[in-house]
Image (tube, rainbow, N blue to C red):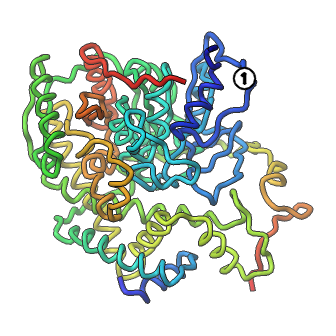
Amino acid sequence: MTRPSFIQGLHKLNERFHIFSEIIERDDDWEIPEDGFHFSAKDNLCSLEMQTRAGSKILDGYRPPFDATSISRLKEAGGVLVAKDNMDEFGFGTFSTNCAYGVPRNPYDEERCCGGSSGGSAAAACLIEGHLALGESTGGSIACPAAFCGVYGLTPTYGRVSRYGLVDYANSLDKIGLLSRSAEQIVKHLPTISGKDPMDPTSWAQPELLLEGMEAKKIAVPREALDGLDESVSDTFMRIMNNMESIGMEVEEVSIPSLSYSLPAYYILATSESSTNLARYSGMRFGVRNDNYNSHFNDFFSQIRSREFGKEAKRRILLGTFSRMVGFRDRYYMKALQVRSLVIREYQKVFEDHDVVMTPTMPFVAPRFNEIDRMRPLDMYKADFLTVPPNLCGLPHVSIPSDCIDGMPVGVQVVAPHWQEGMLADIMLRWEEHFVPKHPEVVL
Amino acid sequence: MDLEVVRKVARIARLELSEDELEEFSRDLEEILEYLSGLDKAPSCEEYGFNPVPIEDVMREDEPCIDIDPSLLRELLDTYQDWVRGPRLA
């Protein structure tokens, strides 16, 4: 039997794992150029060659006339964009189960989810050797799927990577990052996608990216993050902390009292911002068109939005619209902004005496789809309690594949001070020297 | 959340919801808002920003340039001659 070509391999993987919303059109015998590398991008990043639908039916057919800056920078460095990755609609989800173009299956167990919302990106990074995936995180959408799929997932400081060409979820929270089996590959390509971009003012205030010369020695573990973990995840995390001490790092338990307020603050800010961002989908400008021009504009917009948005998108639009209404704005939105500042201050206090903060990435291993079906929306939101704090604060963080429980991967989340991605690079590369996770072997 | 409040919020957000959807979202949002109200107990903070890190304004020279070819809009939008088609305003 002949081995499938690269493109055939992608199609075969997709039939089984539903990773991609679209694969680039090439002849079957086409291969990646020898001096190039292959990458895929979460489908909320605009791309010239393929549709950009952000996991939503309302964007079906949308072909952007430009590449997102992160995509064009990888292409300039020799990258070939081979596919767009399935994701929760507009990033609204913890498990990649709210996807209009296929629910990705976990590479370690196809009955389980990949995590969200960059689920397709994490599965692609896990299943394809040498593959780099562009992800995007608002509240943990890189770290969570990286942990569930056993890969490295790095989310840089807010503003480090230009968001030009990103389908916005929440402007004060969105960050573009990288996922890969290899820490080295992420450290190599982070500088490629980073840097100032006149098309995105949030990228303009960043200091130089320094990835060498930093050494993380002191680890803080916030005790508030250790409640609510599955016992097996808790035991595994403690064992990993002991390993950290055995390679010369100092581990200390600390307190960050405001961590418990991060989750409500995040959901108020994220839904407030997303409900305004989603106002642009009206049946006129992007994706699905409404041809019923004789209707009043209120009906024209409502018809298409009601028909094409999924349930979770509607739920978050309602919540965000409510939070911004007169009479509730001060209680919810303004208070959430204050809490964000408070949490940032408490992190900064911890960083005065410690180099990084570590917790498990997720409180449990990737759940089965039938378990997710039984969860209430609030239960799903609460599952993000470990990934939300660094995302709310715009702090750089990485999920490191660290061990397995009953064959399912567990991730450790490492958080560094603003702009100090070098601290993360140091830990990732040192970890990779000592620990090589086993990835599932898939026979095509 | 009261059904009438959900109905009002949906109208503002340009969403038409069925009676089943209204009831479901009413239950979900009640539960979620009760959890979010935990924020009432959080300490206040006098200083706050709209972004997690300081942001600078970006200014460019005021020179004409073409970023995306406007003629592409004819392909991307429903146009009639050089006009974009849209719904009635009244």
| Residue A337 as seen in the image, left or right of residue A217 | right
Can residue A414 be seen by looking at this rendering? Answer: no
> Where is the C terminus of chain B found, in terms of image quarters?
bottom right
Give the x, y percent position of residue A49: 71, 36
Badge 1: residue crowd in 10 Å (few <14, some 14–19, many ≥20): few
A66 versus A407 height, above or below? below
Chain for disc number 1 = A
- Picture residue at 45% right of the left edge, 56% below the top: A92
Q: Quick one: A433 or A3, which is closer to the camera? A: A3
Residue hosting label 1 = A28
| Residue A404 as seen in the image, left or right of residue A323 | left
Q: Quadrant of residue B11?
A: bottom right
A299 versus A380 height, above or below? below
* Residue lying at the far right of the rendered structure: B81
> Where is the N terminus of chain B found, in terms of image quarters?
bottom left
| Residue A208 as seen in the image, left or right of residue A220 | right
Identify which amino acid the numbered label 1 is placed on.
Answer: Asp
A73 versus A304 height, above or below? above
Q: Quadrant of residue A208?
A: top left
Q: Quick one: A29 or A355, which is closer to the camera? A: A29
Give the x, y percent position of residue A16: 53, 36
Can residue A32 be seen by looking at this rendering? Answer: yes
Give the x, y percent position of residue A251: 9, 30
- Picture residue at 41% right of the left edge, 47% below the top: A116
Give the x, y percent position of residue A68: 60, 39
